[in-house]
Amino acid sequence: MERSLATKVMVREVMNGPPVSGKETDTAAELADKMEKLKVGSVVIMDGEEVKGIVTEGDLVSKVVARNRLPSSVMARDVMSSPLATVESDKDVTTAARLMRKLGIKRLGVTYRGRIVGIISMSDIVAVTPELIDVLSEKARILTGGRREGKQVSGYCDACGEWSDNLAEVDGRFLCEECRGEAGKGGQEG
């Protein structure tokens, strides 16, 4: 049986939780103050245990500031995005990123057993991307036996600069067939 490395990062590993919550009657000023004090970009609007929506920094800018509305007189229910789009905590971050892109949003509520347990943002996903690339690169190296010598690819030759569909890696450089031949002769002309 072939074993593979785990390469998926789960939403629950990246999310921020528990979510910061507010009420539909909170003013935009109160929500902005809460976001600033807690260093978050959104507040989940709740009515008891029921999620009503979300107010993000973007909502405050586009629905209050850009419309020159008085933040102390605008209520959360008037500017919240509803319903809150969600993803299950046991999904991988790729699923969350695809959903955000599809819906044109930057945050998702994270649920576990039907209850909101956190928020995942595009920033959270971007923050783990370098580690994901490292893991995937290591997995590819292991699965190919760690050898790249002799693998042929298309591109520009590192020696002559000409395009070739038959480049091969030799001593860390990608060389076309002609330059590989010259390298094999030791670079000496007859």
Image (cartoon, helix red, strand yellow):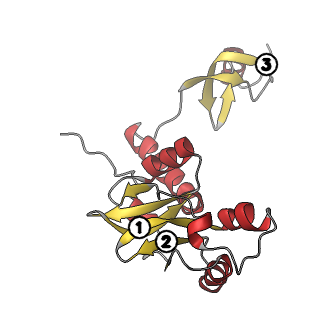
Q: Earlier in the sequence, mark 3 or mark 1?
A: 1
Q: Amino acid at mark 2?
A: Ile
Give the image location of residue 140, x and y in percent.
Answer: 44, 41
Residue 117 falls in image quadrant:
bottom left
Name the residue that disc number 2 marks. Answer: 45
Q: Nearer the viewer, mark 3 or mark 1?
A: 1
Residue 37 falls in image quadrant:
bottom right
Name the residue that disc number 1 marks. Answer: 51
Alpha-carbon neighbours of circle 1 within 10 Å: few (<14), some, or many (≥20)?
some
x 69%, y 19%: residue: 176
Answer with left or right where residue 112 lies relative to residue 29.
Answer: left
Q: Are marks 2 and 3 in contact (CB under 8 Å)?
A: no
Q: Earlier in the sequence, mark 2 or mark 1?
A: 2
User: How many angstroms separate mark 2 from mark 3 (CA)?
Assistant: 60 Å
**Secondary structure category for the residue under label 3:** loop
Answer with left or right where residue 77 lies relative to residue 184.
Answer: left
Give the image location of residue 16, x and y in percent.
Answer: 48, 71
Question: Which quarter shows the C terminus?
Answer: top right
User: How many angstroms separate mark 2 from mark 1 (CA)?
Assistant: 6 Å
- As drawn, the residue found furthest toward the front would be 73
Whether residue 163 is situated above or below residue 25 in the rendered picture: above
Q: Earlier in the sequence, mark 2 or mark 3?
A: 2
Q: Amino acid at mark 1?
A: Val
Whether residue 127 is situated above or below residue 36 in the rendered picture: above
**Secondary structure category for the residue under label 2:** strand
User: How many angstroms separate mark 3 from mark 1 (CA)?
Assistant: 60 Å
Q: Amino acid at mark 3?
A: Glu
Alpha-carbon neighbours of circle 3 within 10 Å: few (<14), some, or many (≥20)?
few
Residue 162: assigned label: 3
Q: Are marks 2 and 1 in contact (CB under 8 Å)?
A: yes
